[in-house]
Image (spheres, rainbow, N blue to C red):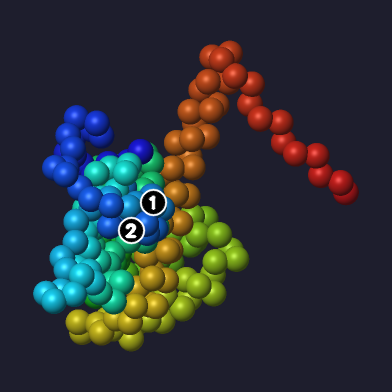
Amino acid sequence: MTLPPGWPEKGIHTWTAPQDIGQTAFRCPYCSRDVGSYLGYQTTMHGNRSPIFKVYLCGYCSGATFFDHEGRQWPGARPGEAVASVPPTVAELYEEVRSCMSVNAYTAAVLASRKLLMNTAVAKGAEPNLGFVAYVDHLAASGYIPPDAKPWVDHIRTKANEATHEIPQVAAADAEELVALVEMLMKLVYELPAKVNARVAKAESGEVAPAEPPDVER
Ligand SMILES: [Zn+2]
């Protein structure tokens, strides 16, 4: 289970007297698991007993999530997944991007995503002080962006050019596209090589044999 930084481990604390407020399912904004819960707290309308606001408690991480009478959720679910083996400064930025998306802060998410991609490109050999598009091109030319993703990257590049010297008005769909690209790149640049290196190191130490490549019929 992934807990937010600094949170106490599950099981060492409990909420006081939570009640059965009806079963529901949602993606927890804190641990990013799809959870079902019936425990929490609620307000009731004066004069009748229908609930107005509900607060559900996550059974995994004990985080509390608020729902209004229209079923809207705060904080919202954070898009994407946590990515392993990312350098701390980049990881902080990536988590900030996910948090921005969960509160509909799309402009902030896009600006932080661009900064993250620029940092990653420089870490992978790009010159400092270039533009966002130059950094995306560097990542693509260096093989970090798969060829099949090129139309997607071209679209993001076009969007970036539209808003180069102004504070962009960012639509939710555009932000989601860029954040999805960021997540894919974090996995390709950091998580996957770290997994492969760990597996090779284990194989070389005799702990486990490397996986056989699948048979391919020609
Ligand atoms: Zn949770």
Residue 37: image location, x then y, percent: 34, 51
Q: Is residue 63 above or below residue 130?
A: above
Nearer to me, 9 or 142: 9
**Residue positioned 47% across, 50% down in the render:** 188
Residue 74: image location, x then y, percent: 23, 65
Earlier-in-chain disc, 1 versus 2:
2
**Residue positioned 28% across, 52% down in the render:** 20
Nearest-to-viewer mark from 1 and 2:
2
Farthest left residue in view: 46
- Which SS class for mark 2? strand
Nearer to me, 86 or 9: 9
Q: Looking at numbered disc 1 in the image, what kind of residue is underneath it?
A: Val
* Residue 22: assigned label: 2
Q: Which residue is mark 1?
A: 35
Farthest front residue in view: 47
Image quarter of residue 49: bottom left
How many dots with numbers? 2
Q: Is 13 left or right of 140, judged from the image as shown?
A: left
- Which SS class for mark 1? strand
Residue 159 in view in this figure? yes
For the N terminus, the image quarter is top left
The answer to whether the residue bearing label 1 lies less than 8 angstroms from the nearest atom of ligand 1 is yes
Q: Residues within 10 Å of mark 2 (few under 14, many from 20)?
A: few
Image quarter of residue 126: bottom left
Q: Is 90 left or right of 197, judged from the image as shown?
A: left
Q: Looking at numbered disc 2 in the image, what kind of residue is underneath it?
A: Gly
* Residue 16: assigned label: none
Residue 107: image location, x then y, percent: 24, 75
